[in-house]
Image: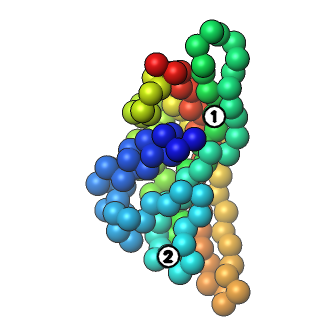
């Protein structure tokens, strides 16, 4: 859903409290960060969901996965995630052609990965429930 992806990107990228913690204002990526992207950065994507088919109006009930990656520490990734949560949980997004009716965090996820070179990369993020209705 391109319009939802654009709305989430715009919301995250417009928040200087978030972007000031990242490698730059362009360090927000859809689905996957590019190879050799500079840490820290944020990645988001639609994880699941779809049409509710409960009313005559078209309504989407989606799960969006938003997460921060850091090469510094779990605490650093968590601080970035805190800013994501502040922006998203209970907030609104402007999706072209749709009305935002729900945006809340549902789950928290943390992990650490070891790269082939032995470097650790920490991730902190969560799933957000997004409900939108066709205007």
Q: Residues under labels 2 and 1: Cα distance?
A: 27 Å
Task: Left or right? Give the position of 121 relative to 37.
Answer: right
The answer to which of marks 2 and 1 sits earlier in the sequence is: 2
| Residue occupying the point 45% across, 46% down | 6
Q: Label 2 neighbourhood size at 10 Å, few (<14), some (14-19), many (20+)?
A: few
Q: Can you say whether 2 is above or below 26 in the image?
A: above
Q: Report the colour scheme.
A: rainbow
Q: Can you say whether 102 is above or below 69 in the image?
A: above
Task: Left or right? Give the position of 1 relative to 99.
Answer: right
| Residue occupying the point 35% across, 68% down | 24
Image location (x, y in percent) of residue 100: 47, 25
Residue 124 visible here: no
Residue 37: numbered disc: 2
Residue 39 visible here: yes
Image location (x, y in percent) of residue 61: 63, 28
Residue on which the image places disc 1: 62
Residue furthest toward the top? 56
Residue furthest toward the bottom? 117
| Residue occupying the point 52% across, 21% down | 134
Q: Label 1 neighbourhood size at 10 Å, few (<14), some (14-19), many (20+)?
A: many
Element under disc 1: strand
Q: Can you say whether 5 is above or below 40 in the image?
A: above
Quadrant of res 31? bottom right
Residue 10: numbered disc: none
């Amino acid at each position: 859903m391109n319009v939802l992806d654009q709305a989430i990107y715009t919301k995250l990228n417009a928040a200087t409290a978030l972007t000031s913690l990242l490698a730059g204002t362009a360090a927000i990526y859809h689905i996957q960060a590019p190879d050799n992207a500079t840490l820290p950065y944020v990645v988001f994507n639609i994880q699941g969901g779809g049409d509710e088919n409960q009313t005559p109006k078209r309504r989407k009930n989606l799960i969006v996965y938003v997460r921060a990656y850091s090469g510094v520490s779990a605490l650093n990734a968590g601080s970035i995630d805190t800013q994501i949560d502040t922006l998203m949980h209970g907030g609104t997004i402007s999706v072209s052609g749709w009305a935002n009716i729900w945006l809340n965090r549902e789950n928290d996820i943390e992990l650490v990965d070891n790269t082939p070179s032995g470097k650790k990369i920490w991730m902190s993020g969560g799933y957000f429930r997004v409900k939108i209705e066709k205007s």
